Image (cartoon, rainbow, N blue to C red):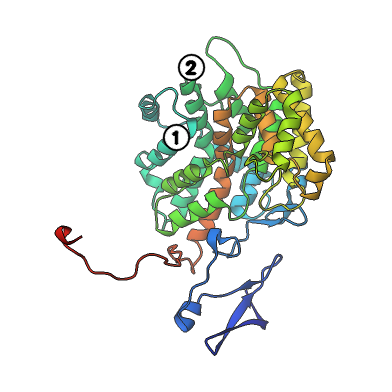
Amino acid sequence: MADTTKTATLTLDGKTYELPVLKGTIGPDVIDIRKLYGEADVFTYDPGFTSTAATDSAITYIDGDKGELLYRGYPIEQLADQSHYLEVCYLLLYGELPDKAQMADFEMRVTKHTMVHEQMQYFFRGFRRDAHPMATMVGVVGAMSAFYHDSTDISDPWQREVAAIRMIAKLPTIAAMAYKYSVGQPFVYPKNALSYAGNFLNMCFAVPAEDYVVNPILEKAMDRIMMLHADHEQNASTSTVRLAGSSGANPFACIAAGIACLWGPAHGGANQACLEMLKEIGTVDRIPEYIAKAKDKNSGFRLMGFGHRVYKNFDPRAKVMKESADEVLDLLGIHNNPLLQVAKELERIALSDEYFISKKLYPNVDFYSGIILEAMGFPTSMFTPIFAISRTVGWISQWKEMIADPTQKIGRPRQLYIGQTRRDYQDVTSR
């Protein structure tokens, strides 16, 4: 909303322009420049949009200086300690925590939609066995619009609701199928008696030849991973979903676009990159060599899984994830694993070395989630698909909010053109 007591004044070429200031419930004020081009014939310049609010939103808030993350106003630490993933999904989608009846109804609707159309299994057979699961997910999720025609009309609120439930329910099944396909094992159908996280673990690790019992500590850790990654304000993949959605694209296409963006190593692929770095280091005795490289500005090397672009303090999700990492490692008794020994020693150094402390390069959520997933037995190629499962509800919540916004326009960023000015074409014989 506009703060009528406050404006920003811009003076350009001797002319003065008064720009309204918008004030949110918390966070920095925002200068409204929507009329600036029409009135002053200038654009603003902000590569990466790091200082530009492209929308208003009531879903998630981050205070990077405080190290604070709020879902609909609730601190992530409280939700991680007292809630569970599907309850957080309800909160993000509908704005309030559910009562018992609402929670039961929501869980039932998600559970009943976990199976995918049987013909979709043929899509997997078209991919090479060594295809990255994210490549498979981008294709299969995009193809959902070819199977679920009754939930692609974005003008119909009920169809938007059905599409949301379908994607939250089916993404774990699709990701598990991508994993099973990559290791040459048969697909495992979902089980309605299991929890959301437990069902995903069962679909990944069960085989027809024997029973698989979901360990409650691993189940809780997976639930937390999903909860902590459920939404994170207007990041690259969320902005991609919103930009795709602004054109009127169907919801399945929008989420497929988000998955494609998430694949990047600077975004959702960060925990995979972190584990690959740990494998490169190899053993604890080589850590000093890599610490020295990290401190050398000219080396070109940086430690993955440390620090965060938004959080200038400790990543609040990392505190919670560290607890789960310790619980999982204790349960599995694999402290002698060389990779995990390297991770624990790097963690110790980062929390005690003055260089890391002064630059606030604390272990982030990607560092700890990678350790947990590695310990559970997931290959690094599955780390980003699990992130995609977790973030699906955030993408959908943001997409639904955007569709319902009467001020929404198709995204059209501007540019500062630095190419050739007008010139005339010359025949090839004259060049």
**Residue 203 seen in render:** yes
Task: Give, as a three-letter code, the residue at label 2.
Answer: Gln
Residue at point 59%, 51% (across, down): 93
User: Which sits earlier in the primary sequence, circle 1 or circle 2?
Assistant: 1
Residue 29 lies in quadrant: bottom right
Residue at point 53%, 49% (across, down): 237
Q: Position of residue 415 (x, y in %)?
A: 45, 66
Q: Secondary structure at mark 1?
A: helix
Residue 341 lies in quadrant: top right
Q: Which residue is mark 2?
A: 185
Q: Sort mark 2 into few (<14), some (14-19) or many (20+) by Cα contacts within 10 Å.
A: some
Number of marks drawn? 2
The residue positioned farthest toward the bottom in the image shown: 14
Q: Which residue is mark 1?
A: 135
Direction from residue 55 to residue 85 in the image, left or right: right
What's the mark number on residue 418? none
Task: Give, as a three-letter code, the residue at label 1.
Answer: Ala
Separation (CA) of disc 1 from disc 2: 19 Å
The residue lying toward the viewer, choosing from 55 and 200, is 55
Q: Sort mark 1 into few (<14), some (14-19) or many (20+) by Cα contacts within 10 Å.
A: some
Q: Position of residue 64 (x, y in %)?
A: 72, 55
The answer to whether residue 23 is above or below residue 288 is: below
**Residue 113 seen in render:** no
Residue at point 68%, 82% (across, down): 6
The answer to whether residue 275 is above or below residue 101 is: above
Q: Secondary structure at mark 2?
A: loop
The residue positioned farthest toward the front in the image shown: 430
Q: Position of residue 1 (x, y in %)?
A: 62, 74
The residue lying toward the viewer, choosing from 328 and 298, is 298
